[in-house]
Amino acid sequence: MGEKGAKPDLTGGDLRIAVVVSRFNEDVTKRLLRGALGALEEHGVHEPDVFWVPGSLELPVTVLALAERGNHDAIVCLGCVIRGETYHFEIVAGQSAAGIMQVQLDTGVPVAFGVLTTEDKEHALARSGPKNNKGAEAAEVAIEMANLMREVQG
């Protein structure tokens, strides 16, 4: 069988990718989406489906519904959770990540985690800009994992 995944396969021409984006901190998530869509286009993914949700806690249930439909080879999740003065940050960030991970394990559909969890707005903007965009990175992870899963599953 040989080694698989040693080098990323970012060929996306025949992949169906969905992107689920949180509206909370929309000024940042729009930047993440712009990066993700740019990376998908660069790697040949045409017309990805984009779904907007209220916040990062709504990402897992939307991703689950999409994964169960079976219309996508991979899904990209984009969101931004900025630490505030309460424990809310930890709950939202942790539960969103746990829910997204559970969807992958339950369905076998790769879900790339592009949810920023930052100390402040400045850090969020720095990770969603044109040169350092975690949305673009998440899109590439989705492509790579979709291709790897095809290899693994035959």
Image (spheres, rainbow, N blue to C red):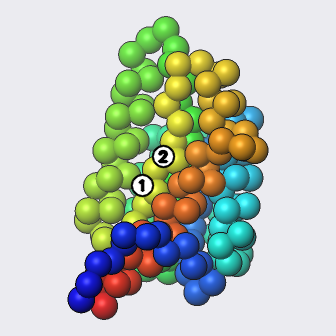
Instruction: Residue 62: give x, y in percent of width and height.
Output: 48, 58
Quadrant in the rendering for residue 17: bottom right
| Mark 1 and mark 2 residues within 8 Å of each other at the beta carbon | yes
In percent of width and height, residue 135 lies at 61, 50
Can the viewer see residue 51?
no
Q: Is 65 situated left or right of 31 in this image?
A: left
Residue at mark 2: 58
The residue under label 1 is 61
Question: Compared to 101, does 4 lie above or below?
Answer: below
Task: Please state the total of marks drawn on the protein image.
Answer: 2
SS state under label 2: helix
Residue 77, how many percent across, how many down? 52, 53
Q: Which amino acid does label 1 sit on?
A: Val
- At x 49% / y 31%, what residue is drawn? 117
Residue toward you, 96 or 34: 34
The amino acid type found where label 2 is placed reads: Glu
Question: What whole-number distance in Å separates the C-alpha atoms at marks 1 and 2?
Answer: 6 Å
Q: Which one is nearer the viewer's eye here, 93 or 141? A: 141
Q: Name the image quarter holding residue 69.
A: bottom left
> Which quarter of the image is occupied by the C terminus?
bottom left
